[in-house]
Structure formats: structure tokens, C-alpha cells
Image: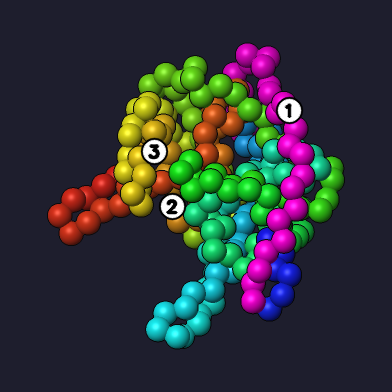
Amino acid sequence: AQPTDDKGAYRLERRPLPDTLPSNDTGKTLTPTQVYQMNVGAVCGIATQVTTNVWGQTTTSACTGSGFVLTEDGYIVTNCHVVENGISITAQLTDGRTLPAMLVGADSVSDLAVLHIDTTGLTPAQFGDSDSLRVGDTVVAIGDPLGVKFRGTYTDGIISGIGRDMDMDGRTMTLIQTNAALNNGNSGGPLINCYGQVIGINTMKMGSSSTVSVEGL
């Protein structure tokens, strides 16, 4: 997102998205190490500067999350809630570069956003079919829990449920349930099957309250 003036107005540049996305359809089950090596280069950290105004007081804060590369020429997908209301967005790549990102489009209902960074030669993620998932399938997540300090953290689990309807900020989302460990900062990162294919985006974690203790949801 690139503001055009000091008031934070955005210039939205529409770029064509690809008709198809790459897919590893060999059907070969990979080891956990192979899955990580295949995908870590496609995962990036997302940092958003957010300005809020409460009772006439303007404050700026930072929101961090994860994302992953759609195409080698700079398209990245993340969660909408990671970048919404941002006055600037940056993407930190696996090679250490931090580049400004432009918001191409976002949808709060599905909690998805597409960014573009001005570079080429990126490693895109491989994509699979989430409709083929079964409860008990092995999955892994890669992302930046708690920010860049734990960059590229890899956690594993299984598909714990399919088609879970969850209410979030007044909207209902139909989600995949997993027990792979997720924390603040994992939002927008990929959920990956045993073939190294992205089959979901990590969006929500159920939190504990004063009356209910929650683990692995």
C-alpha cells in the first residue's frame, strides 16, 4: 500500500492475476523436512503500520503477520485483517530483503488480501485441493508467530475437522480445523499437506477465557 499524500490516501494499481497457479501433482508423499524445504522460500513476513484516531488522539501501531508467494513476479496472499487500515505494508522475504507492498485487493468476508511487491524470481507456493482433505490427514504450518523473532517457524498437526462454521466480527466463515500450533503472527501463512501443497490459509485461533481453557483449536 503506497499512500499518495500525508493523509494516507491510497493509490490502488490493478494488475492482472494469473489464470492458473502452480501445483505439485506428482502424488508423492514428502518427509516433513522436504515439505519445509519446498515451502519456506515462499513464506514471507508481513508488517503493517496502522493509524487510529480515538477522541482526537492519533496513534500509530504495528501489526505483523505472515503471507506466501502466489507468483514469481511478486504476488503475495495474506489475511485481510493483517493489512486492513494500514498506511504502509512491507513484506520480508526469506532472503532477508524487506520490500514495500502494494495492496491489490482485499475481502473482509473471506479474510483474504492480495499484495504485490516490485520484484521477480520469487519461489511460488504449490497449491493443492482442499476439497480432497480428510480428517486425520497430516498438515503443517509455516509462519512468523510473535513476529520476526520466530521467523519461519514450522509446526505440524492433523486435520481435526472440516467445514467448521465460525462467527468472526459479525460474519460466518467456513473453516478447516487443525491442531497445528498457531499463534499471533501466524495469520496469513500457509497450511500445507503432506505433498507440499498449500490447502489453506491460517486465519483464526480459538483463545482461552476465564471460564474455558482451549488447546489446539
Q: Which residues are magenta?
A: 7-34
Q: Which mark is residue 19?
A: 1
Residue underneath mark 2: 183
The Cα atoms of the two marked residues, 3 and 2, are separated by 19 Å
Q: Nearer the viewer, residue 196 or 132?
A: 132
Pinpoint residue 176: horizontal percent, then vertical percent: 41, 32
Q: Quadrant of residue 4?
A: bottom right
State the SS at label 3: strand
- Identified by mark 2, the residue type is Asn
Q: Indicate which label's residue lies in the foreground, 2 or 1.
A: 1
- Identified by mark 1, the residue type is Asp
Pinpoint residue 29: horizontal percent, then vertical percent: 59, 18
Say whether residue 141 is visible: no
State the SS at label 2: loop
- Identified by mark 3, the residue type is Met
For image coordinates 69% across by 42% down, the residue present is 69
For image coordinates 71% across by 56% down, the residue present is 12
